[in-house]
Amino acid sequence: MMQAFIDSLWATARGLPVTLAIWLAAVVAGMALGFLVGALRFFAPRLVSWPLAALVETVRGVPFLVQCFLLYFGGPFVGIDLSPVMAGFVALSVYGAAYFSEVFRAGFNAVPPGQLEAARLLGLSRPATVWRIMLPVMALGVLPALANLAVILIKETAVLSIITVPELTFRVQGVGTSTFAFAETTLVLALVYWGLVEATAMLARATERRIERALAA
């Protein structure tokens, strides 16, 4: 039993950096893409916003595991041949972007119309209106939802073990398979993910407090 715990800790040390790297990169890429899609759905004409809405709903409606299978195993049939790590990053980024886009779109809709009218009367361009008016107003409103999605994505990284990404779950489950100590290894895995989720939540709360102080200054 003790050896299984020790082996699990070593497996965690090897898999955790991969999990964190994919997760952080996917959160950044997903937020950037989601912000772009959300802004286009809010500002662009229906000819653009409707296809984007259909794409977002499609991604949200298909389980993440199925999306990983389609990209990694089905991709080569259409000329998309990605390594497990790259396929995992792309899948997690696109999956996250669909949900991030809805958060940002809701944030745009929550900005009082009077402020947008005032910006238009002052002659502000659309990018200046977004940067100077909309983003500060929507920042506090969307932050809890963004943090919640980041937490969801860090747990979804466990799915990437199915396509042999050498992340945390893949490494620790390998110890369980070789030692048959599934209870011990699963306990270690659960505790590590719990710690990651709590750390992310604490960081989000600290960021929210800083934004509140900045807006109040």
Image: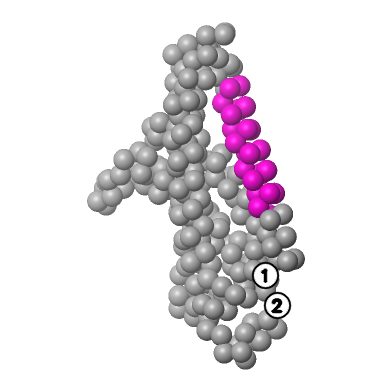
Q: Residue 59: image x %, image y %? A: 49, 55
* Eye-nearest disc, 1 or 2: 1
Question: Type of residue at label 2?
Answer: Pro
Residue stretch rendered in magenta on the structure? 187-208
Q: Residue 196: image x %, image y %? A: 60, 36
3D distance between C-alphas at marks 1 and 2:
9 Å
Viewport quadrant of the N terminus: top right
Name the foreground residue: 91 vs 122.
122
Q: With 82 as the anchor, is 6 left or right in this view? A: right
Q: Residue at x 64, y 82 (%)?
A: 116
Taking the magenta stretch, the answer to whether it contains residue 190 is yes
Q: Residue 175: image x %, image y %? A: 47, 17
Element type at mark 1: helix
Q: With 153 as the anchor, is 70 left or right in this view? A: left
Residue 112: mark: 2
Name the foreground residue: 198 vs 70.
198
Taking the magenta stretch, the answer to whether it contains residue 91 is no
Name the foreground residue: 8 vs 155.
8
Q: Residue furthest front?
A: 217
Q: Neighbour class for label 1 at 10 Å: few (<14), some, many (≥20)?
A: some
Q: Are marks 1 and 2 in contact (CB under 8 Å)?
A: yes
Q: Residue furthest right?
A: 216
Name the foreground residue: 136 vs 3.
136
Q: Residue at x 72, y 54 (%)?
A: 209
- Specify whether residue 173 is in view: no
